[in-house]
Image: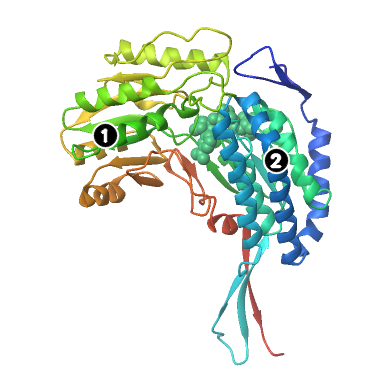
Amino acid sequence: MQQGRIVSTSPQYPGDVVASLAAATPDQVNAAFKTARLVGQSWSRMPSPERAGALQRAAQGVADAASELAELITREVGKPISEARGEVVRAERILHYYAQLAYESDGETYPSAGAGHLLFSRRRPHGVAGLITPWNFPVAIPVWKAAPALAVGNSVVLKPAPEASSTGLRLGEILQESLPAGVVHVLVGGAQVGVAVVDGADVVSFTGSSVVGREVQVRCADRGVSAQCEMGGLNAAIVMPDADTVAAARMIANAIAGYAGQKCTATRRVVVVGSPDAFAEALRNEVERLPLGDPADPGTVVGPVITERARQRISDAVAATVASGGELMTRGDLPTGAGWFVRPALVIGAPDDAVLNQEEVFGPVCTVTSAATLSDAIDLANAVPYGLVGSVHTQSLSAAIEVAERLETGLVRVNEGTTGVDFHAPFGGMKASSFGPREQGKAALDFFSKTVTVTISPG
Ligand code: NAD
């Protein structure tokens, strides 16, 4: 990618240039922050019903453009159309949800320490929220950051991932049509523009890789600005001997390879308690049955990966894991035809320090290992730098409780795949997966505001 020029191409038809745009210049970044800060003052003072109304209009705007947005997501980042449609519906619901939360109590009262005193706390927005987002959920992630930021009265400067520039700009237009001019800005660009947004913002919400997230944390700490960073995962699914094999294998196969494994919550490691062979075979069958192909086909589950470089990294990581002692259970060939398609890969018996067991490889790849006891399986699941989500598949309540208590992850799912997020509940991970307060749900309102404690005496 040329410095200063952002080109996004379709992963399934790499000759299809979806966007070719000039990256935002430093002057444009400064102008966006200047306007956002100025206009943000009246936006923050606007009565809640008006802010709620604007978010409702934005929800309607997303609903009206649903087909167009879903098709654009599919074209630009190769997400299977059925999932892309689901993502757009989710974005609409998130906007409705935070429109209602604009009416949420914005503080608390306290018993006063002095006669006749009134003591209360109240939220205030930070000012301009800088939002940096990845390409894999190019509508839902910007919306789940922007909606709570706006609901509590911040203005927003969003920098979408370069690979999803066109989708980010189109989403920005929809939000801009519903909100007062100058409250929402979308700046196209790569790392340099990302740095400028981090450096200009009063509060920063980032989602992306752990390497970049760490850099964002340091820059924000240096300026004393609140930051939340949601980053990678190396998520484990633990399968107990009493699990419903067919149901668990189907669920886990989808969590491994749906959207070609390009979700931070995708299952990357399966740990079978007891002998792994029967479950591994059931899983292999399910993974190989997943329809792979053109993401515009509603039946497709596994589309392409985002770039040629990503495809190379995936096949290198599988080869390195096999070289270190794992056995490839699935077909290892590359699908023919245009596009960055890669066949889902399961590797069984790889050592704990194999690449796929220690590094987040963003593709439809997963290891299968075994553990003698549930306790050993939990230790294995925890033995990585990440801690986003984990699942356990079992009929045993005590096993479910033990996993929920001991897994070092921000999300624990019982008899559910690791993928899937409830936007009205707190979301985030532990260890290298997450930094700062949770996002989504009501937790997001706290992050995007600061509390002022007021004492009023009768005078
Ligand atoms: P990335 O880290 O490469 O980029 C994320 C964003 O940061 C992009 O907009 C990018 O342009 C910007 N950026 C790059 N360098 C920057 C810098 N120095 N300063 C500021 N911004 C900078 O990630 P990606 O490839 O777009 O997305 C894939 C990653 O995102 C995976 O690691 C995945 O696990 C993670 N992810 C996490 C979650 C979650 O909620 N935990 C959700 C989706 C994706």
* Viewer-side residue, 236 vs 12: 12
Q: Residue at the far bottom: name it.
A: 115
Do we see residue 88 in this rendering? Answer: yes
- Please determine whether, in this image, residue 322 is positioned above or below residue 40: above
Tell me how many marks there are.
2
Q: Residue at x 67, y 35 (%)?
A: 67
Residue 450 left/right relative to 333? right
Q: Secondary structure at mark 1?
A: helix
Give the quarter of the figure containing the N terminus. Answer: top right
Residue 214 seen in the current view: no
Identify which residue is drawn at 30% across, 26% down: 283
Secondary element type, mark 2: strand
Q: Position of residue 229 (x, y in %)?
A: 54, 42
The tag on residue 380 is 1
Q: Amino acid at mark 1?
A: Leu
Q: Kindly identify which residue carries mark 2.
A: 158
